[in-house]
Image (cartoon, helix red, strand yellow):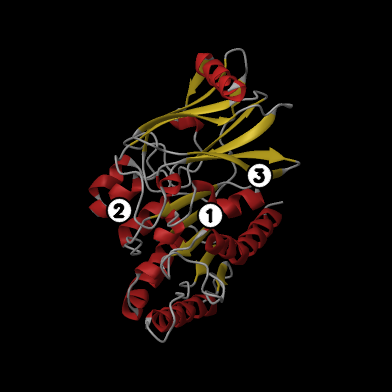
Amino acid sequence: MRFFLILLSAAAALSAQTITWTDIKQADIEGQGWRDTKAPFDRMPAKAEKTIRPAVWSLSRNSAGLRLRFTTASPAIHARWTVMKESLALPHMPATGVSGLDLYVKQDGVWRWIANGRPEKKTNEQALVQNYKGPIREYLLYLPLYNGIESISVGVPEGAKLEILPPDTRKPVLFYGTSILQGGCASRPGMVYTSIIGRRLDYPTINLGFSGNALSEPEIAQLLAELDPAVYVYDSLPNLGTVAMVNERTEPFLRTIRKAHPTTPIILIENVIYTQSEAVSSRPEQAREKNRALRAIYEKLKAEGDRNLYYVPGANLLGLDGEGTVDGSHPTDLGFLRMADEIGPVVGQVIARTLDAHR
């Protein structure tokens, strides 16, 4: 009985606690390529609504890869956020990944996971951290992968100080790709491979993943060519259903970017090898056929003299044991870690070479 009363007393104290809220504005957010957006947390510029397919436009309103950095010494950190869509989860992806938040803290120069925001409805208010005593620390808060954000605030107890850090101004790594790249089916936003790589390198990234709709259209290439990243990462093959589509679309897409950015590194990612047994599915061999087509395009462009083109094979992206996916193609957190292990070192090496070249 006494233990129950103690719990009630603690809950009452928490509910009576006064929270000072900081509303997050677009200018505070990292991971956007454009600021002239229709809504503050969109991933494409407002003008794109008239030029890209409706499905791509709709997906561009998901906040995949967007994040916020702040510092505080507060022992408690709260979050309040409203998502665009009432549906919080997918049949094969939890609400924590689709519509939740993900909080990391920097310890000894390394980003460590500390808490997540678990959505229960369209608008949520939760304590992410309690009783975390210590000095001022730097935090990284990821926004939802498959839902959009209407508004978000971060709160600390009255009297505590919270400082929003300005976005990283270094040229980012720009990732373009499919539902996998957007984050399906990570358990939480920080586990998509683009974000894992960003934390490991402590380097800014832009996630332009469009679930089922990374079709390498000319209008998308033109939009990407407007930006000036440190590196482009092209991971579109899973949405190009045939070898014919790979041959038809990939080379023009890459040439559009290369025309605008003659020396910017471009990393090509092969199609993941789907993990279904080849005894019951032809998908693994279809992926290999598309990969052979991509390799031929890569070799052609290299033979023409493109010295800033790089390549990541797909054979080991998900591992070889069949345990890295939810459904044969969309990674679990294990699958995303494996993808980051394969792709991340290449991204890191390319960034290092680029920085050395400009010194």
Q: Does dot 2 land on a helix, a strand or a loop?
A: helix
Q: Does dot 1 land on a helix, a strand or a loop?
A: helix
- The amino acid marked with disc number 2 is Val
The dot on residue 98 is none
- Residue at x-position 36% and y-position 61%: 214
Gap in Å between the C-alphas at discs 1 and 3? 16 Å
- Residue at x-position 50% and y-position 69%: 269
Q: Nearer the viewer, residue 316 or 10?
A: 10
Image quadrant for the N terminus? top right
Q: Nearer the viewer, residue 30 or 266?
A: 30
Establish if 9 lies above or below 70: above
| Residue 92 can be seen in this image | yes
Disc 3 marks which residue? 112
Question: Which numbered mark, 2 or 3, is in the foreground of this view?
Answer: 3
Q: Tell me which label, 2 or 3, sits earlier in the chain.
A: 2
- The amino acid marked with disc number 3 is Arg
Q: Residues within 10 Å of mark 1 (few under 14, many from 20)?
A: many
**211 sits left or right of 316 in the view:** left
- The amino acid marked with disc number 1 is Thr
Disc 1 marks which residue? 194
Establish if 109 lies above or below 138: below
- Residue at x-position 51% and y-position 13%: 16
Gap in Å between the C-alphas at discs 2 and 3? 33 Å
Q: Tell me which label, 1 or 2, sits earlier in the chain.
A: 2
Gap in Å between the C-alphas at discs 1 and 2? 19 Å
Q: Tell me which label, 1 or 3, sits earlier in the chain.
A: 3
Disc 2 marks which residue? 56
Q: Does dot 3 land on a helix, a strand or a loop?
A: strand
